[in-house]
Image (cartoon, rainbow, N blue to C red):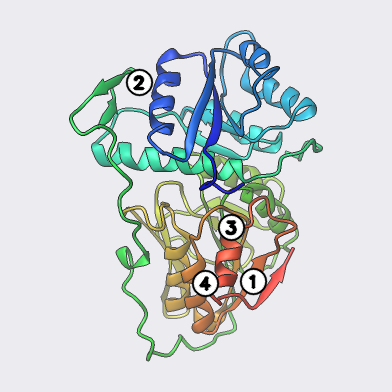
Amino acid sequence: MNPSSKPVTVLIVDDSAVVRQTLTSILESDPQIQVVGQAQDPFVAAEKLKTLIPDVITLDVEMPRMDGITFLKKLMSQHPIPVVMCSSLTGEGTETALRALEYGAVEIITKPRMGTKEFLEESRIRICDAVKAAAFTQVRNRPIIRPAKAVNGTGAIQSQSGGIPKISPKLTADAMLPPIDPGSRAMSQTTEKLIIVGASTGGTEALRVFLEALPADAPGVVIVQHMPENFTRAFADRLNTLCQITVKEAADNDSVVRGRALIAPGNKHTMLKRSGARYYVEVRDGPLVSRHRPSVDVLFRSAARYGGKNCVGVIMTGMGDDGARGMLEMKTAGATTIAQDEQSCVVFGMPKEAIKHGGVDLIKP
């Protein structure tokens, strides 16, 4: 679907009237999104779906009468519609929301909560982008995979002068790392190789397939998967039980070594660094870059600067263009670069933009 042709229509399913009102206000601040219905539980949602077919459903995890996971499984088996799970940041809610991705949900967002004006604007960007990305996905019945307006403390909307702020200008990786000097030479090649990966919508499943296939002595891997904070740790822990390599959420100063994959923590930028023969990651705060934190562009630029031809860069399924410029920088620095092909992508956005920028050597499933 072309977002410029008509708005993305959304049905909000949440037992909290305050959350439904807050999400409606956030989503309808974007002219490309239209909320066409609300439901306080899955039974009401099912009745509405008899006459209303939205482009996207936002679905609460915990609701009375029927929980979100049960409804999601019924929906995917009977009438597949792109679903964005709306979850709290609690440990149990995190695990449940991750299971929802295995059952067919395409994105996870966290429920909007009180914060600074900058925090609320970033939350708005993430929520609106997740819904628009979901509208581009092709969902289908599939087997289960293994395992300003502001918000007050209760989530209620409060009026403030100026309303919800407009989207700020999109920052590039310059906000975290200075541009690479075109005249400088990439770091000399070593025997130690690295795999640097970026993914977004649909990436949780693509990464599972990719990482499960790696042998125990595979080169070190560093990954940015667009995902809210706290979810990346649970995602890494789950992958760690499935893969021959070790998978963990990256922590500042973690070494990048053979047989281990590091996943950038949600809400933190992660960069590759090098000290002598040792590669490690730096995990830092910073602004949204290419509308994301962590940003693929930030990771890829750092890989171009400190890894050069020692790296293989991989860009996977996802909406938008995060990683496109960084992948070109990696290629220019001597890295081999690979994009996921359109047929196997849930959303052929990020790989398409990387190809368009001229930064891709190979296109593979």
- Mark 1 or mark 4: name the one nearer the start of the chain: 4
* Inter-mark Cα distance, 3 to 1: 14 Å
* Inter-mark Cα distance, 2 to 3: 33 Å
- Mark 1 or mark 2: name the one nearer the start of the chain: 2
Residue sticking out furthest to the right:
143
Residue at 62%, 40% in the rendered image: 106
> Percent position (x, y) of residue 48?
64, 16
- Say what secondary structure mark 2 lies in: loop
* Inter-mark Cα distance, 1 to 4: 9 Å
- Kindly report which numbered mark, 4 or 3, lies closer to the viewer in this rendering: 3
Q: Amino acid at mark 1?
A: Ile
Q: Amino acid at mark 3?
A: Gly
Q: Which residue is mark 2?
A: 155
Label for residue 327?
A: 4
Marks 1 and 4: CB-CB under 8 Å? no
Q: Residues within 10 Å of mark 4 (few under 14, many from 20)?
A: many
Q: Residues within 10 Å of mark 3 (few under 14, many from 20)?
A: many
- Kindly report which numbered mark, 3 or 1, lies closer to the viewer in this rendering: 3
* Inter-mark Cα distance, 4 to 2: 39 Å
Q: Nearer the viewer, residue 244 or 304?
A: 304
* Inter-mark Cα distance, 4 to 3: 14 Å
* Inter-mark Cα distance, 1 to 2: 43 Å
- Say what secondary structure mark 1 lies in: strand
The picture quadrant where one finds residue 40 is top right
- Mark 4 or mark 2: name the one nearer the start of the chain: 2
Can the viewer see residue 31 in this picture?
Answer: yes
> Percent position (x, y) of residue 23?
43, 26
- Mark 4 or mark 3: name the one nearer the start of the chain: 4
Q: Which residue is mark 1?
A: 338
Q: Which residue is mark 3?
A: 349
